[in-house]
Image (cartoon, rainbow, N blue to C red):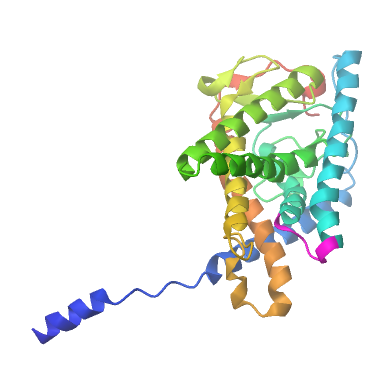
Amino acid sequence: MAIDSAAKQAEDTAVPPLPRRGSTTFLAAVGLVWFLVCVNTIARWVTSDTEFSPAPKIGPDEMADWRLIALRVFEVISLLVLAAFIWFSVVQPIRKTGKLSLDGRFVIGGLICFVADAFLNVQEYLFAWNSENVNMGVWVKFLPFHNPEAPSRYAESLIWGPPMYVYFCAGVAIVACHHANKARRRWPNMSKVTLFTYVFIGEFLFDFIVENVVIRTTHAYSFAKTYEPLTLWAGTVHQFPIYESILVAAVGCVFTWMRMEAQDHPEGLSPIEVGLVHWRPALREPVRNFAVLGFCMVTLVFVYHLPFNWLGLIGTSIADLPSYLLPA
């Protein structure tokens, strides 16, 4: 009886909470490793005798003048959008507080994670790039897991590419939180599942509209090989895998969730950062920076890049591409 009583008392004792240092430390380690991979990859690319140069143009096909003008307009708009994000999310908060905000860290994390964009073609040419893009080739040859038989001479955009990693991550989170806050004030009993369902639908539509407008007007890029059952306009230069918008919206929802959690936290900390209290004050800012970078990388790789590559590699829908969208 004494043993049973002791066992029951042990069961009734409150379970102590687990320390939350682990996720922050783990993500910071991931961020540090990814930063070192980026430095190594870009350094090897820039010092390469063969890869660091504009991708050669092949074949007889020429872009229509109006498409080329549309491409240049898209590049200019992308630069302006990126400049606005850097000014409002990075520069202004630093000038006011001397520190980066979570939005600023998302912006910088997105720019650094743009290096991972070359993972799209690390095994096969799944994502086609226009040789008219302002470019210096691509660094895919120097990324981990690169297939030596995969093409490495194509025109990864240096102008409109990086801003996409900002406005499809940090940008949609900022906009989604703004509208979510209005919805929460109007319908205070709305569940989180319902709220994020609307967020997902909005981000899905945003990606679907933006990408299809860009593809059809500029030919800046195309989806070279896709999973046909989930592809619209299969086999054409404009073919569009519907899972592209699903994956991009999922990424946006994860960033929105982190931002919303930080907004609701009494100290403004997201789940990425709550373990900082276990670090000495002198190390908290660098740990926070690398933790957010690690979060950006983990989210983009596991929510977007891996599913996209898997569906592309098993895909059978091959786009009929003009020569300016083919690799050398």
The answer to whether residue 192 is seen in the rendering is: yes
Check the image and report above or below for 277 versus 213. below
Relative horizontal placement of residue 32, taking residue 47 as reference (left or right)? left
Total labels drawn? 0
Check the image and report above or below for 102 versus 278. above
Please report the bounds of the magenta region as a residue range: 96-102
Q: Residue 53 versus residue 216: which sits nearer the camera?
A: 216
* Residue at image location 88% in from the left, 13% down from the top: 64
Which residue is outermost to the bottom?
Answer: 2
Q: Position of residue 158 (x, y in %)?
A: 85, 39
The answer to whether residue 51 is seen in the rendering is: no
Q: Residue 75 falls in which quadrant of the image?
A: top right
Q: Position of residue 308 (x, y in %)?
A: 59, 35
Q: Residue 46 versus residue 215: which sits nearer the camera?
A: 215
Which quadrant of the figure contains the C terminus? top right
Which quadrant of the figure contains the N terminus? bottom left
Which residue is outermost to the front?
Answer: 186
Q: Residue 51 versus residue 138: which sits nearer the camera?
A: 138
Which residue is outermost to the left?
Answer: 1
Check the image and report above or below for 161 versus 267. above
Relative horizontal placement of residue 227, taking residue 135 as reference (left or right)? left
* Residue at image location 87% in from the left, 61% down from the top: 95
Relative horizontal placement of residue 144, taking residue 153 as reference (left or right)? left
Q: Residue 293 falls in which quadrant of the image?
A: bottom right
Q: Is residue 33 magenta?
A: no
Q: Position of residue 278 (x, y in %)?
A: 59, 77
* Residue at image location 79% in from the left, 18% down from the top: 217
Q: Position of residue 123 (x, y in %)?
A: 64, 38
